DNA sequence: TTATTTGAAATCGTATATTATCCAATCAAG
DNA sequence: CTTGATTGGATAATATACGATTTCAAATAA
């Protein structure tokens, strides 16, 4: 009588290619597949109990996103990310995020700001507990909320993808700097104040970019001259 | 004896997947495959005298770039681009191009500037001959030269990809506005002067972005209020 | 030491089978 | 007679297995 829902459990809901994509991606971000790791299609296919074609497609997709390098007739390997890449990503993120946040400005509601404030508080907590993982997570959430209302969807997409690249690096070679973290929280408060009080978006773009540049500078000084606190 | 060079002309130098990629892409940009056109894998495979697997890979790559949409178990179709997309792309391009050009500033040589000037002259010519096609081409070249020296390769990659998106739209629904073209050439000269005289990159970013915003504005006014010359 | 050869391993491409989606014709109900 | 649901067939994407081609490295010989 009632329209039969597919009781035969039509199956996976996810194509094998998507499955392989997620499987590989998870292993890259978790650090199990370190940069330079050779992704052999047949091996992965065997592990996932499928043929190589879906795996191949997954790998090509990851290549398009930049997480793996691919060489013709040779194969794929997890992309190398040295610290010069960190610089590149942070700089790019500053540009995109700054523009997106400024454009988002006109559409940000009081509710958004309230959420942002609660996130800062969570960051403060995780800082007190010395929990870099959630601190970093919340940091990303904070910024994404501020630019999420940007009417230019392309800008937000690009900013999101830069955040993702950043996450891939972080797991392997990110050193947490408590002093900078405290400073960062303070800048977040300032940024919210700026958004609440200002009438034009121009200053916001600069503030966001400066915020990003500052953490980049801290990272660089801490890596070249070992442990020189700002 | 001598190591046999592949006289049998081992083949294409290009993989079939790459071939299919270029083949489809060319047809999209040339306008033969209009937005919404259904890309049937088997048909394309037959036309190119190959199996569907390479075609599939090509289509997925085009999907990653945004020129085609893909629906699970249904197929691919050329991406729709309305004029709101034009706005999005131009705005994004302004942001990326502005930042990249400003960062490029310190590395631009006299030779680069000379080339840029010669390109402007070519634009002037094509404008006199009313040749919108080469005018647009040269315009792209001009801007790409100015930001090509940017040390942040990610920014230049993103800017390039936005230019490509723009080209996909142009062929289908771009109206050439001579008045704006003349103005654009003038702004190019001003931009070169700015680069030659200024010592910091800050003003350059704004100038490039303003230049892009101006052409966007012209387009919008010409499309909403039909034919109101600025 | 250097150049050539040989073989294993992995990708690239084809042919074929399976599965999902779409569309139109048929049938039942109002 | 019209409208809505159902079913069957056609079309196209998804996946598998197998053969062809390329690459890289180790072993051999000059």
Image: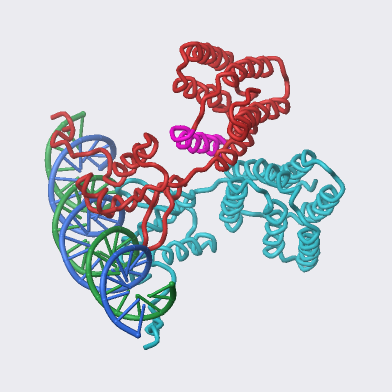
Chain colours: A red, B cyan, C green, D blue
From this view, report whether residue B71 is shown above or below residue B135: above
* Front residue (pair B46, B55): B55
Q: Is residue B222 visible?
A: no
Q: Name the side, left or right, on which B103 lies relative to C26.
A: right
Residue shown at 51%/28% (left/top)?
A: A175
Residue shown at 45%/49% (left/top)?
A: A64
Q: Return the x and y of residue D3 as percentages of the image width and height.
A: 28, 36
Q: Name the side, left or right, on which B118 lies relative to B46.
A: right
The overriding secondary structure of the stretch rendered in magenta is helix
**Residue A90 location, quadrant:** top right
Q: Is residue B163 visible?
A: yes
From this view, report whether residue A181 is shown above or below residue B203: above
Residue shown at 54%/39% (left/top)?
A: A158
From this view, report whether residue A169 is shown above or below residue B53: above
Q: Return the x and y of residue B10 as percentages of the image width and height.
A: 38, 78
Q: Which residues are magenta?
A: A153-173
């Amino acid at each position: 009588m009632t329209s039969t829902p597919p009781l035969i459990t039509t199956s996976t809901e996810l194509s094998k290619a998507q499955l392989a994509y997620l499987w590989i991606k998870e292993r890259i971000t978790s650090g199990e597949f370190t940069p330079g790791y050779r992704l052999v299609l047949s091996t992965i296919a065997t592990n996932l109990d499928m043929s190589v074609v879906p795996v191949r497609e997954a790998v090509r997709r990851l290549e398009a996103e930049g997480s793996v390098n691919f060489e013709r007739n040779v194969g794929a390997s997890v992309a190398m990310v040295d610290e010069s890449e960190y610089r590149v990503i942070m700089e790019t993120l500053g540009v995109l995020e700054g523009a997106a946040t400024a454009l988002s400005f006109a559409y940000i509601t009081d509710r958004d700001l309230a959420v942002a404030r609660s996130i800062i508080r969570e960051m403060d907590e995780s800082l007190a507990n010395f929990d870099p993982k959630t601190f970093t997570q919340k940091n990303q959430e904070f910024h994404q909320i501020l630019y999420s209302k940007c009417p230019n969807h392309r800008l937000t997409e690009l900013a999101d993808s830069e955040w993702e690249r950043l996450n891939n690096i972080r797991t392997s070679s990110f050193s947490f700097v408590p002093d900078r973290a405290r400073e960062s929280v303070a800048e977040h408060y300032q940024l919210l104040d700026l958004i609440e009080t200002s009438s034009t978006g121009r200053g916001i773009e600069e503030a966001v970019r400066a915020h990003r540049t500052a953490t980049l500078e801290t990272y660089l000084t801490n890596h070249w001259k070992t442990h020189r606190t700002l």
